[in-house]
Amino acid sequence: MEYTPMHGIGNSYVMIGEEINEPEKQSVILASKYKTDGIILVLPSETCDVKMRIFNSDGSEAEMCGNGARCVARYAVDKGIVNKPCITLETGAGVKKLYPLTENGVTELIKVDMGISEVLDDISVSACGKIWRGTAASMGNPHFVVFCDEPKELCLEEIGPVIEHSRCFPNRVNTEFAKVHSRTHLEMRVWERGSGETAACGTGACALAAVAVAKGYCDADTDITVTLAKGDLVIRVCSDRRVFMTGKAEYC
C-alpha cells in the first residue's frame, strides 16, 4: 500500500488511494508514524469525480477538511485519477468543487468552492477560569469563532480541549481564536476536534471569514487573507454566503 504524506500550509495528512481495514485504528497509527493530523482516503465515487474520507489523529472521522480537499485535488491530478479544470469531490459535508491552478506544469495552488456558510448563534463558554464569547458557525462541520487581541499568547493546550468537549457542542467543535488586522486581513490559531492544535484549518478559515463578514469586520465579495501558523489562505465570502478558498497543496 502506498502512503503519500501531503499538507496544506502545514495541515498534514497521509493520503491513501484505496479503502483500508479499520481506518479509525490505522489513522492513529499512521498519524503518529508520519507526524500528521490524520489520514485521507482518496476513493472512487458513484456521483463525483472522486471521494474523500478523512480520519483525525485520534481515529474520529470528520465530515470535511478544506486543506485536505486541496491535497486530494493535487493527488488526484498527479496520480492521473482525474484531469479536469473542475473536479467534483464527494465529502461527508456534501459535494465540493475543486479548481486546480496549474503553472509551469505543476498543480500546487487549488481553489475550492466550499459551499454555503452558516453563521449561527453567539455563545458563551466557560474554560480555564474565563468566559469565552464567540459565534457558532458551520462549513458542513461545527466551528466556534472567538475574536481576541493576541491569539499567539493563548495556551490552547489548556483552553482548546475544554471548549471542544463543552456541552454547548454535542458533536464537539473546532475553535478558531482570531485577530482582525484590517478589513482584508485576519489572523487565527485553531484547535481542531480530534487533532488538537494544528498549523492550519481550511474550513476554520472559511468559518472565520464568514463570521467576520456577518459581524461587519470584513466585506463580502472581497478577498480576505487569513494568516495561519505556516502560511496564508485567501478566502472570499460571496453575498449569497457561498465561500471560496484558495491555497497551496504540497508534498511533505
Image: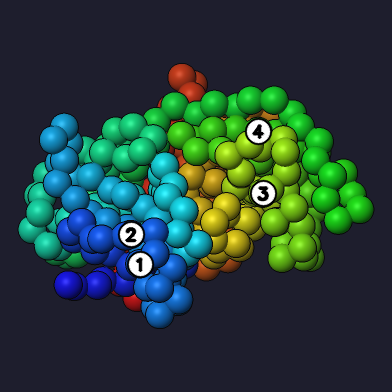
Q: Quadrant of the N terminus?
A: bottom left
Which residue is at 72% across, 48% downward? 163
Please report whichever mark, 1 or 3, sits nearer to the chain's N-terminal start. Answer: 1
Give yes or no for contact between labels 2 and 1 (Cβ–Cβ under 8 Å): yes
Tag 4 residue: 136
Q: Secondary structure at mark 2?
A: helix
Residue 125 horizontal/vertical position (percent): 80, 40
User: Residue 218, relative to residue 110: is it above or below?
Assistant: above
**Closest to the observer, 99 or 82:** 82
Give yes or no for contact between labels 3 and 2 (Cβ–Cβ under 8 Å): no
State how far apart marks 3 and 2 are (Cα).
23 Å
User: Residue 74, relative to residue 49: is it above or below?
Assistant: below
For residue 54, side relative to residue 46 (left or right): right
Q: Secondary structure at mark 1?
A: helix
Which disc number belongs to residue 23?
2
Q: State the image quarter where residue 26 is shown.
A: bottom left
